[in-house]
Image: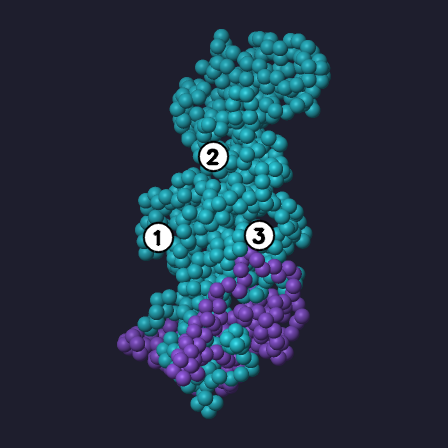
Amino acid sequence: MIIGLIMMLQKKFEYPVEDGNIDFIYKIHKYIRGGLPDYHGANTLGGFNYEVDPEHSKWINVNGFAQDVSGISCLQPMNKDEVMAICSHEHGHFTFAGGHLTYGKNVYGLGAELFYSPYEMIASNYMYPRIANFGETNYLGDFSSRNNQSGEIIKIPISDNECFLLSNRRKVSDYDRLMLGDTAIINPNNNWDYGKGLYIYHVFDSIQVPMGPYSTPQDMECADGLFQWDTNGRAAVDLNCWTGQPDWYVYKKSHVIYSNDPSGLTSQSLIGDGLSLWYFTGYNYLNYPLGLPKMHDYGKNSHNNCLFGTDRIFTNDKELYSKFDRDGDRYDAWNVGYNEIFSPFSSPSTCDKSNAYTGIFIYYNSLNINTNEAAIDIYKSTDETSLNNILELTPPSRPMGLTVDTCFAGGVDEYAIKLEWNHNKEPDMLRISDEDVKKRYNVFRSVSVNENSIPPDTFFYPENKYVLIKTVDIDTSITPFFLDTINNIKSICVYLPDVSCPPICYNKVNIRYRVQAVDIYDDVSRLSDFVQTPGFRVDSTGGTPEDNGIGEMPRGGKFLHSDIPKEYDLAQNYPNPFNPVTKINYAIPKSGFVTLKIYDITGREIKTLVNELKQPGYYTIDFNGSELSSGVYFCRIVSGSFVSVKRMILIK
Amino acid sequence: MKSVKILILSLLVLIPLKINSQNSLYDKCCLSNYSNSPLVINSPFDGLYKPNRTDTLYGSPLPYDASFRILIIFVQFKDDISTSSWPNDNDTSGPTYKDSLISNLKNFNNNWWDAYDSHTEPISDYWLELSRGRFHITGSVYSVVLDSNASYYASLIEWERMKIINEHIWIKLNQLYSITWPDYDNWSYNDATKKI
């Protein structure tokens, strides 16, 4: 009987039934003045009850229980979009959540996110998730697509009360385009591609309605990784844009985290994996930086630093972040060609809220751009055998924590550019021999034309812009590192010899690096985030080099683990310039007589390095110029009808 | 008899608490599997303090023309600065986008994503898109310029200030417009906590 009574009382709304209260008013004040409260929205009209229609006994109610309140206040919207954002947020407090939650429409920030998150969609009975099929490719349409009333959400159970929710946000609906951070709001000519991708939400404690006033039910697992953030003092603020304070706190990533988000979400400091919201950040999302939106500092560039957002294509991942960079950016979505692996070994990882292993793998392996349908392989390992099978089917996660030391003291030269990164965690990265255990990585490089330009780069598939310069096998007992002594690139700190330009020119350039993990099945990861450093490109012209600013790049890495070459090749020697020893790689696809000789700039033969019959394969030979003077030399290979020449620079 | 009274009183106290704590899981996160069922009938959540759907309530279909009808009221103080997007031409002008916010009538287009115009009826369009076709919001838009400057209201004691501002708004609305107020009282909230 009690249950029946409760069920009856749960029918709380009735239509059409007059109750004497005006249902709902959006009261929109032009300005915050006249003693109006200094905020931009409130879930009340304020004041006292007022009988607005005595004849019909109709009241504007403001003092009753929430269900009796006749409306909301929206203050000082700058345009129609802000009316939408502020008022829909306040209205949401009546339809969904009295309080604020994380990563959704009813976050703090008055509508910075206009669309509901999957959590809110499910809780509101607007969408009905599908349970993931483990061990299969799961197809997921656009989150705001018009397919049917069920919507598009995949739920991956972790336990009775904990799960991941996947939404593939291709932003078919205009209302799904505004999101936190700069996921979709940076470019005034926005084509709305920013922020598109697969969003992975981690729901900790079931989906509940209504939310409490300080509810933090979900985290976002961000594709650009999970970091421990440390404060790093304050940085100047452009007062033309950011009035009120001359500087602002900045932050740095101190280390990569491979477990669950340790920061502890709170309602006012929502420090998630990457995308979250600081109190009062977001309401003014359309070019109106009155509150505390994103700012840019320490070399960060955007299209206009008076706008929101940081375009990290133009910035160095090692640089400091404003708190708003920390709060989120467009790289939080998972995308094919950017970051495709969310696993127990990635950062962030699929471990549960207690940091326990879940065995869940998510491999976002393709997107049909015509239908917006994502193909997502979802696995769950239950034992060692299934884990090994899954690892064989999935590539490694992309390496994390890449840093660059511009002036590392050591190496071939007095100073060298040194990279360091974190070892990948996947068990199938281990290459075990009798002597040691190593993991394999590819090192990629991209070089700018000059010091005032940025190296060729791209958000998706950067490997198409970068050049593979080396494959390295690194012992698991040490931190992975790489000293770039390859070809014609040098640290900005090297001693500049007394040479004239031409023929020997030290050109200041910007250099970017990314690394790639290679597992034992030769599956490769997506490239890591980049690091950037200034450096010298040494050549004989001092002008704009060919081939994207880097001339012909060495491909030393290719020689390490390929089989029979498909074509003849003479690679650029490295290092180059050199002093006095350099390596020369060449490839022979079929048996034949090979000569490889060195000539000076006058064409005089200096030395014969190879003059014999060679079997198909890759070869490396050292050339020692200790008895020669500084200058330009040529390396010439002949095998059958194949002839190739490379120019080398000896600097003593 | 005394124990019966206590039981009844206990029920009266506990039942509202139970209702307000419906937060305790109607969808245990990882257990429910709605598959692709088009609708969940008898949903225990049809809105928190106001309804969030106009198609059905508790499994029963609502009238064909059901909508959540709201009033949108733009308010200026007498001396608010005129802007290009919100001029002070007269009492009823309001912002330039005043008449391109919400649909006055419910639209019955079967394709809910095309039911309202996102440029001229964005509030109606937004809620219908968000709810995937379940929640129609319609309404009317009015604008008032109050007779006093902002400084007058700022000079009022704080507890009285919003009361006076709002009273002036409601009075001005009735002076300027013939609003049929009963048109905006269509929903009632019916449970033990209800006050009016």
Mark before the other along the chain sequence, 2 or 3:
3
Residue A483's spot in the image, x, y percent? Answer: 47, 26
Q: Amino acid at mark 3?
A: Ile
Residue A509's spot in the image, x, y percent? Answer: 47, 32
Q: Amino acid at mark 2?
A: Asn
Residue count near mark 2 (Cα–Cα under 10 Å), binned few <14, some 14–19, many ≥20: some
- Residue at 59%, 23% (x, y): give it: A560
Q: What is the chain identity of the residue bearing mark 1?
A: A
Q: Secondary structure at mark 1?
A: loop
Instruction: Give A574 or A347, whichever is nearer the viewer.
Output: A347
Q: Secondary structure at mark 2?
A: loop
**Relative vertical location of residue A261 with respect to residue A150 in this rendering, above or below:** above
Mark identifier at residue A156: 3
Residue ID for mark 2: A422
- Would you identify the image quadrant in which residue B43 lies? bottom right
Q: Colour of chain A?
A: cyan
Q: Secondary structure at mark 3?
A: strand
Q: Colour of chain B?
A: purple
Residue A261's spot in the image, x, y percent? Answer: 45, 47
Mark before the other along the chain sequence, 1 or 3:
3
- Residue at 61%, 73% (x, y): give it: B59
- Would you identify the image quadrant in which residue A548 lies? top right
Instruction: Give A466 or A515, whichever is nearer the viewer.
Output: A515
Closer mark to the observer between disc 2 and disc 3: 3
Mark before the other along the chain sequence, 2 or 1:
1
Residue ID for mark 1: A239
Closer mark to the observer between disc 2 and disc 1: 2
